[in-house]
């Protein structure tokens, strides 16, 4: 068995000092045993009583130790006999199960039983602690946690990234836009003037946190989770003309750093707040974003059921990192969520009707509470099969709701429960989301599963430190992001390290930063920004950049009237999201489809992306505008022009070998453009009329170079 | 690791595993490697990092590729594939409650609805003696290659949910299509074309748009790539105006060199992977136009598919007017695609939703698709490709024996949606042709024998591709998702 080929090892890599000393360590239930039980045993011996075999449940110690497990005596335990049996009738898991145990997993079970078969409450259901950062040289608390873990593995952190890299990284991360050349030069000069000082970087971070583009960048993440779209979905896919008002509310809320608890309350129950404002009602658009089937002949009750189930599932996923959706049809197989819990949560939303508010008071799509409806458990998740009555209630495995007295608990109680300091999940989950955007992966790598089948945190104490810090600082998103990006851990170089490829191939210990392929919108924004084409207005109705007729014409009733003038050069997050016609450039780079809450985007790498970067009109036009910009801004010397072009695209000066290669390409490309005659000058495109007539050849050549530079992996990635 | 199949790992796990191995063993980075070796099929990158690297199926496959012809809207089974002599006898009469039960309808007024007869004439075709309607004379000549399923049923009676069910295995948005699952399970066998291609000809338009071929929660690299009509079949395939192929090649060379320098400096294997993507894209720039250029086809082939045929006149048609040549071309292109290693092809036409004017419009649509589809089957067979190419004809549901009497209709000229029983056929790729599978009652209302659900149909497709539908999983929202959810049985009777 190699280290890398052991799935078990990969699950728990960062928690183990080394494989060799594994056996010497005491087995920990949460770390070692629960993931195995959940993956391989709970399907038949877990919380779901409908599927439970032999009346045995292994998720509760009292039940498991009644007969199957004799604590301290593995050899006397039926459990051990079964998992080691050679009799096909006896052996567990049964031979038909695709989830078989490995030898090392069996040995872990043996050791666990021998050590008294202790159970622990699942880590994410335990109260959030407030750990003190480990002692050491690191002055920043995050670094203290990270370095303590690194030193256990005899690793040291990577050096700090150079200033040009740092400003590009933190600008892209905080505002979703690359820095301007002036900003880079100024920052690099300041760093040189004040060697070893944190001051230039801290000033930079504070400037970026107050930029209005900060709200745009971080709103997009939230919109992914809100499954935001500008259309209904399904047949017809009608445009929701006011959906953007919710999008703008998110941008504004993030820019004014609306505390996350209030941010939560307003979106789930803004309409129930006393004297609720138009803004607070707009916020409730969160759940109105879900797709809606309005096809003729649709069963309205079924459509409503699906829509409300989506709200339950999304709330569970986005705020609690729980796969509550699994309990829609049956009690959860791995986590302590019963089907009754599910419909108790459903009951909070069941009194909600959607209304397209057209009055001037609340022009957004908002939630309005209607007459009370009785909620039932729906057997097997079938909207038509009613089981027992249920009342609104929190999940039984989590702290109870605050007592609402005689009044039936409502969505406002639910929202307040979610953000109460006693809730073990909300802050952890929110912190993990923010962290994941800054490192590419969360401290909990399964962003949407903090339950038994999710992976445990790589740095549990750090997660809790951040989660409690987040609440202590008034749920301030900006404060938390500031805390993270000012750490040395965040500022490390992202260069790959040979010394960790065997030990930590996925870099979960964070002995360097990660390079991250830019999100779809940010990639587009970067090209527009470098070229100077970007229109920086905030908010307003969504835009429609050019799209070939046969692409948008595939649906039933989609009209794609291309946005005029500079509107088409607005940021990618403003592009109209039609559920039946996802904008190809965005989809190609893994933008979500707004079907479900997306808590983590893929970062794929495909030939279609290459075609998009090379030939999509927005990137071609950016190359054209960029060439003209260089002609206008740089002196006539070609070497200086190439350097300027390089700096505009990559935010750093070229190295000599790079400028050599670029110069060589410039010369050969110039010759081709020259011999290509009039045809070759077609590449001027949108700058055809504005290019100085005596520099048309050179400008056309520079478009070709700009195109190459904007296709570099370095441009496509956050460093 | 590369060649051995670990049975209890999903493709996702296998991919992550090989990637992990790759990361763990690549100690010095790739900066020094020559480009040629980077691009070698199944080389270091092709085999280990690329999510579309070819993967071994669970067991020996019968089908290596699939052409899935999706005729959107619900073609009338009793006018095409499932003859019901009693329809004309009971024309104008109500159906007893014992048959209709508590069925729901989209538009039909249950209380006053009556049976609508059919003008169609059915004859027996092939050695097997398969009953096929006079609207499909060409396809009828392929009867001995076709397994006609008359006992399909679905649980959705509205278009989009039904279509998502048929194409993606669930009536919800956000699920991967069959083609995406197959691509995820097996990777891309082509080094210059996408693995999963979609061609659409439309009249009224496709309700789900691109969600019909979406990768859903799978990474987007497994989604269908829509081929467009014209010389630049893939969006953004053509170089911008003013950039020649020669310039493009030189640009790519400069790009690769600069990327290599960066790779040497940073050591991130993703950079090498990106270089690979650009090379593939460049090859696609010549391979895709070549694919849609029919100049190399003989006149006999072009004529067989009807690429240049004249469309007969019709006043109006839900399925559009002017699609005859396009559909012929799509069928011929489908053959050219599977020849070149494309694994999954969707040929889509909308619409067959004949609530009214069924007779003329169904006839028109049939005339459009009959000849090219038959030509495709024969062409594949003649080239020895039919044995390993699965061809499917299907739609989201069928239609009612009752005529549609929606308020405002002057006369009864069409049929409503019917999910309870409908017909679909499969040919080639491990299918036992020349058989009718399953049967319905006298009004094609209920399935009488051998019901086949959408999940069964999907399980069977995956089986033909050598994959166990219960093992092809992807972890999403904390659950191992399957194309077949928790249902589906392989329909053994359909297998050769």
Image (cartoon, rainbow, N blue to C red):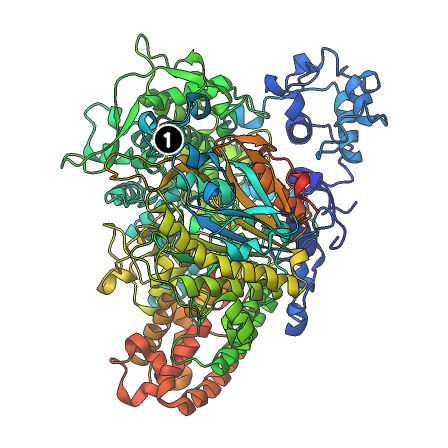
Front-most of residues B119 and A29: B119
**Residue A5 vs residue B453: left or right?**
right
| Farthest residue, direction top | A406
Circle 1: element type: helix
Residue ID for mark 1: A303
Residue B137 rendering spot, x and y as whole percentages: 51, 55
In the image, residue A64 above or below residue A505: above
Whether residue A511 is visible? no
Residue A532 rendering spot, x and y as whole percentages: 30, 68
Mark 1 belongs to chain: A
In the image, residue A699 above or below residue A398: below
Residue B6 rendering spot, x and y as whole percentages: 74, 45
In the image, residue A80 above or below residue B418: above
Residue at 37% over, 85% down: A679
Residue at 64% over, 17% down: A60
Residue B226 rendering spot, x and y as whole percentages: 46, 59
Whether residue A695 is visible? yes
- Within 10 Å of disc 1 (Cα), the crowding (few <14, some 14-19, many 20+) is some
Front-most of residues A36 and A98: A98
């Amino acid at each position: 068995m190699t280290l890398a080929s052991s799935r078990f090892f990969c699950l728990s890599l960062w928690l183990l000092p080394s494989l060799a000393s594994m056996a010497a360590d005491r087995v920990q239930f949460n770390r070692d045993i629960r993931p195995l039980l959940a993956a391989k045993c709970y399907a038949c011996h877990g919380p779901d009583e409908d599927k439970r075999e032999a009346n045995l449940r292994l998720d509760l110690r009292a039940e498991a130790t009644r007969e199957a497990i004799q604590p301290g005596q593995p050899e006397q335990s039926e459990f051990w006999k079964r998992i080691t049996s050679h009799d096909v009738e006896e052996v567990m898991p049964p031979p038909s199960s695709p989830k078989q145990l490995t030898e090392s997993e069996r040995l872990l079970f043996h050791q666990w039983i021998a050590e008294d078969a202790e159970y622990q409450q699942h880590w994410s259901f335990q109260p959030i602690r407030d750990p003190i950062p480990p002692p050491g040289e690191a002055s920043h608390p995050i670094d203290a946690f990270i370095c303590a873990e690194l030193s256990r593995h005899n690793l040291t952190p990577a050096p700090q990234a150079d200033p040009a890299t740092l400003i590009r990284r933190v600008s892209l991360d905080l505002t979703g836009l690359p820095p301007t050349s002036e900003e880079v030069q100024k920052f690099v000069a300041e760093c040189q003037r004040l060697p070893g000082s944190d001051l230039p970087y801290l000033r930079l971070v504070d400037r970026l946190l107050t930029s209005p583009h900060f709200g745009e960048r971080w709103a997009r993440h939230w919109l992914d989770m809100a499954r935001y779209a500008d259309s209904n979905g399904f047949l017809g896919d009608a445009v929701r003309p006011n959906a953007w008002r919710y999008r703008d509310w998110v941008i504004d809320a993030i820019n004014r750093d609306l505390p996350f608890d209030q941010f939560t309350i307003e979106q789930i129950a803004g309409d129930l707040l006393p004297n609720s404002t138009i803004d607070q009602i707009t916020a409730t658009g969160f759940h109105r974003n879900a797709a809606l089937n309005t096809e003729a002949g649709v069963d309205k009750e079924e459509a409503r059921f699906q829509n409300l189930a989506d709200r339950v599932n999304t709330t569970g996923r986005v705020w609690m990192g729980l796969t509550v959706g699994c309990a829609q049809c049956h009690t959860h197989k791995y986590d302590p969520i019963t089907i009754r819990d599910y419909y108790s949560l459903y009951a909070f939303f069941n009194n909600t009707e959607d209304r397209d508010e057209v009055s001037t008071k609340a022009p957004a799509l908002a939630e309005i509470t209607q007459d009370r409806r009785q909620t039932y458990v729906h057997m097997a998740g079938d909207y038509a099969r009613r089981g027992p009555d249920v009342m609104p209630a929190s999940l039984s495995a989590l702290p109870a709701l605050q007592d609402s007295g005689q009044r039936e608990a409502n969505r406002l109680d639910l929202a307040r429960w979610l953000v109460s300091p006693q809730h073990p999940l909300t802050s952890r989950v929110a912190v993990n989301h923010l962290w994941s955007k800054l490192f590419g992966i969360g401290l909990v790598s399964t962003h949407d599963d903090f339950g038994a089948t999710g992976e445990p945190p790589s740095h549990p104490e750090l997660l809790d430190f951040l989660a409690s810090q987040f609440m202590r600082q008034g749920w301030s998103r900006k404060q938390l992001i500031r805390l993270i990006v000012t750490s040395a851990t965040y500022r490390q170089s992202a260069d790959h390290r040979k010394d960790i490829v065997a030990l930590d191939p996925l870099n979960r210990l964070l002995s360097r930063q990660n390079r991250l392929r830019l999100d779809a919108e940010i990639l587009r924004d970067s090209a527009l920004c470098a070229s100077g084409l970007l229109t920086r207005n905030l908010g307003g109705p969504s835009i429609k950049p050019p799209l070939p007729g046969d692409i948008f014409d595939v649906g039933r009733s989609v009209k794609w009237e291309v946005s005029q003038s500079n509107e088409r050069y607005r940021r990618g997050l403003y592009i109209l999201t039609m559920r039946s016609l996802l904008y190809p450039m965005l989809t190609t780079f893994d933008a979500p489809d707004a079907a479900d809450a997306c808590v983590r985007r893929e970062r794929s790498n495909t030939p279609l992306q290459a075609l998009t970067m090379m030939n999509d009109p927005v990137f071609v036009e950016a190359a054209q505008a960029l060439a003209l910009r260089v002609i206008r801004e740089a002196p006539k010397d070609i070497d200086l022009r190439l350097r300027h072009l390089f700096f505009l695209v990559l935010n750093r000066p070229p190295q000599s070998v790079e400028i050599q290669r670029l110069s060589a390409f410039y010369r050969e490309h110039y010759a081709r453009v020259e011999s290509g005659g009039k045809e070759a000058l077609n590449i001027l495109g949108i700058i055809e009329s504005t290019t100085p007539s005596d520099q048309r050849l050179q400008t056309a050549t520079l478009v070709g170079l700009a195109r190459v530079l904007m296709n570099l992996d370095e441009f496509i990635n956050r460093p | 690791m590369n060649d051995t199949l670990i049975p209890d790992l999903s493709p996702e796990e296998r991919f992550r595993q090989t990637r992990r191995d790759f990361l763990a063993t690549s100690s010095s980075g790739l900066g020094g490697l020559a480009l040629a070796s980077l691009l070698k099929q199944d080389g270091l990158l092709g085999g280990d990092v690329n999510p579309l690297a070819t993967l071994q199926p669970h067991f020996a496959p019968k089908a290596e590729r699939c052409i899935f012809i999706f005729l959107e809207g619900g073609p009338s089974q009793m006018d095409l594939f499932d003859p019901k002599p009693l329809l004309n006898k009971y024309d104008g009469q109500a159906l007893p409650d014992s048959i209709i039960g508590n069925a729901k309808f989209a538009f039909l007024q249950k209380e006053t609805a009556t049976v609508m007869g059919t003008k169609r004439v059915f004859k027996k075709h092939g050695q097997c003696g398969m009953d096929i309607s006079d609207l499909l004379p060409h396809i009828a000549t392929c009867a001995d290659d076709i397994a006609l399923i008359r006992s399909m049923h679905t649980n959705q009676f509205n278009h989009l949910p039904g279509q998502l069910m048929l194409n993606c295995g669930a009536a919800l948005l956000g699920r991967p299509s069959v083609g995406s699952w197959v691509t995820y399970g097996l990777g891309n066998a082509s080094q210059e074309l996408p693995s999963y291609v979609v061609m659409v000809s439309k009249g009224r338009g496709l309700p789900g748009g691109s969600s019909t071929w979406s990768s859903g929660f799978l990474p987007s690299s497994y989604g269908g790539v829509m081929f467009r009509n014209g010389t630049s079949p893939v969006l953004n395939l053509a170089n911008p105006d003013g950039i020649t192929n020669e310039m493009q090649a030189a640009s790519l060379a400069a790009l690769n060199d600069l990327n290599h320098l960066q790779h040497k400096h940073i050591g991130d294997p993703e950079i090498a992977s990106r270089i690979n993507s650009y090379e593939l894209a460049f090859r696609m720039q010549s391979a895709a136009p070549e694919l849609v250029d029919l100049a190399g086809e003989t006149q006999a082939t072009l004529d067989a598919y009807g690429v240049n045929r004249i469309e007969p006149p019709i006043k109006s048609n839900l399925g559009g007017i002017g699609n005859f040549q396009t559909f012929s071309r799509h069928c011929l292109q489908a053959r050219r695609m599977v020849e070149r290693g494309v694994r999954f092809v969707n040929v889509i036409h909308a619409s067959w939703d004949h609530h009214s004017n069924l007779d003329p419009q169904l006839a028109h649509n049939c005339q459009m698709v009959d000849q090219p589809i038959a030509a495709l089957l024969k062409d594949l067979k003649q080239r020895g490709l039919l044995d390993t190419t699965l061809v499917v004809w299907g739609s989201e549901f069928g239609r009612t024996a009752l005529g549609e009497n929606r308020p405002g209709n002057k006369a009864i000229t069409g049929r409503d949606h019917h999910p309870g029983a409908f017909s679909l056929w499969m040919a080639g790729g491990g299918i036992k042709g020349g058989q009718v599978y399953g049967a319905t009652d006298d009004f094609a209302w209920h399935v009488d024998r051998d019901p086949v659900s959408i999940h069964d149909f999907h399980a069977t497709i995956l089986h033909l591709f050598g994959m166990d539908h219960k093992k092809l999983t992807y972890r999403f929202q904390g659950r191992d998702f399957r194309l077949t959810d928790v249902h589906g049985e392989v329909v053994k009777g359909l297998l050769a």
